[in-house]
Every structure is written in structure tokens, then in C-alpha cells.
Image: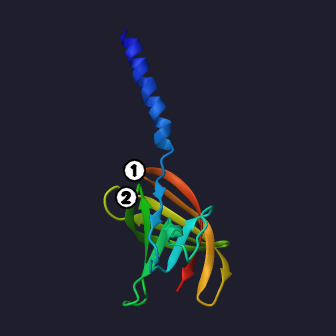
């Protein structure tokens, strides 16, 4: 009987594990008319400037224009909690740029943003790439598109 009880308990744990594994680590930030420098949304998301419901992002940065050299701070939502990111390193790659961040506060996560520049305009540049997150909430890689500029 003990074996049967343990087997049932073990099966219940296994049944729960896939559900937990499928939970999103990177969650959307719904922020209409956000004042940001870089704004990235999921690759399969359709962003429309005139539709506030479409203002759903996975990552954004803001620049402090009061202090030179204008530091840029990143933000991401992890498990539905907006988290500020500290830039750990940035490197130019053959195909673009890689930025490594660490989330501030409890349950820190490592965040790697790999960006490839696309079409450039007068005031902004389009980007696509991936955001890889790893930490206590799990790990996930999200494909994105978006832009940086004023």
C-alpha cells in the first residue's frame, strides 16, 4: 500500500511538472504611450502606434538625459513583475550587439539581449533578435522586433 501511495504522489508531481515548465518567464508589459528609448515586442506580435491595446512589450530601455554620458536602463517583466535591469556588459558582434543584464531585487535573473540592426531612419533604428532569461523563475528565450531612438 505504501508503494501505491508513493507511486500516485510521484505521478501527480510528474503531471504538474510540464505545466510549470510551460509557464512564461518573460511576460508582456502593457504600457500605452511609454516614453522609452528602445522598445521591443514579441516577434509574432503586431504593434500599431495608433492602437493602445497593441502597446505590449517584452523589453524597454530609458535614457537619463540629465547626466552624461546618458546612461540607459533596461526593464523587463519576469513572472508579471516589472524588473529593472543593471547592464553588466555590452559587446559588439559581427551581426550586431549583445548586452548582458542582471535584474535588481529579489530572485535575480540573468538577461542576455542579442540585437541585430535593421532599417535605420533619421531618428530610430529597427532591431530584431532574442532575449534569453535564466533565473529562479526558470529560463526562456524570446524572439523580438522593435526599435531604438527618439
Give residue 1's position: percent from left, percent from top.
Answer: 37, 9
* Mark 2 surroundings: few (<14), some (14-19) or many (≥20) residues within 10 A: some
Under circle 1, the secondary element is loop
Q: Residue at x 43, y 69 (%)?
A: 75
Q: Which residue is mark 1?
A: 136
Q: Residue at x 44, y 71 (%)?
A: 31
Q: Quadrant of residue 10?
A: top left
Asked if 16 appears above or below 100 in the picture, the reply is: above
Residue lying furthest left = 106
Name the residue carrying label 2: 108
User: In 3D space, how far apart are the residues under numbered discs 2 and 1 (Cα atoms)?
Assistant: 7 Å
Q: Nearer the viewer, residue 18 or 45?
A: 45
Residue 82 place in picture, x, y as percent: 38, 64
Q: Are marks 2 and 1 in contact (CB under 8 Å)?
A: yes
Task: Decide: is 79 above or below 43.
Answer: above
Colouring: rainbow
Q: Secondary structure at mark 2?
A: loop
Amino acid at each position: 500500500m505504501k508503494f501505491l501511495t508513493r507511486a500516485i504522489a510521484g505521478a501527480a508531481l510528474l503531471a504538474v511538472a510540464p505545466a510549470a515548465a510551460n509557464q512564461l518567464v518573460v511576460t508582456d508589459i502593457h504600457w500605452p504611450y511609454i516614453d522609452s528609448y528602445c522598445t521591443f515586442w514579441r516577434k509574432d506580435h503586431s504593434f500599431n502606434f495608433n492602437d493602445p491595446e497593441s502597446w505590449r512589450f517584452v523589453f524597454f530601455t530609458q535614457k537619463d538625459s540629465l547626466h552624461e554620458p546618458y546612461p540607459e536602463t533596461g526593464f523587463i517583466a519576469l513572472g508579471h513583475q516589472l524588473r529593472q535591469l543593471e547592464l553588466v556588459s555590452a559587446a559588439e558582434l559581427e551581426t550586431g550587439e549583445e548586452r548582458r543584464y542582471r535584474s535588481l531585487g529579489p530572485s535575480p535573473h540573468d538577461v542576455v539581449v542579442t540585437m541585430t540592426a535593421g532599417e535605420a531612419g533619421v531618428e530610430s533604428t529597427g532591431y530584431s533578435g532574442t532575449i534569453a532569461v535564466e533565473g529562479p523563475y526558470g529560463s526562456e528565450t524570446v524572439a523580438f522586433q522593435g526599435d531604438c531612438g527618439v
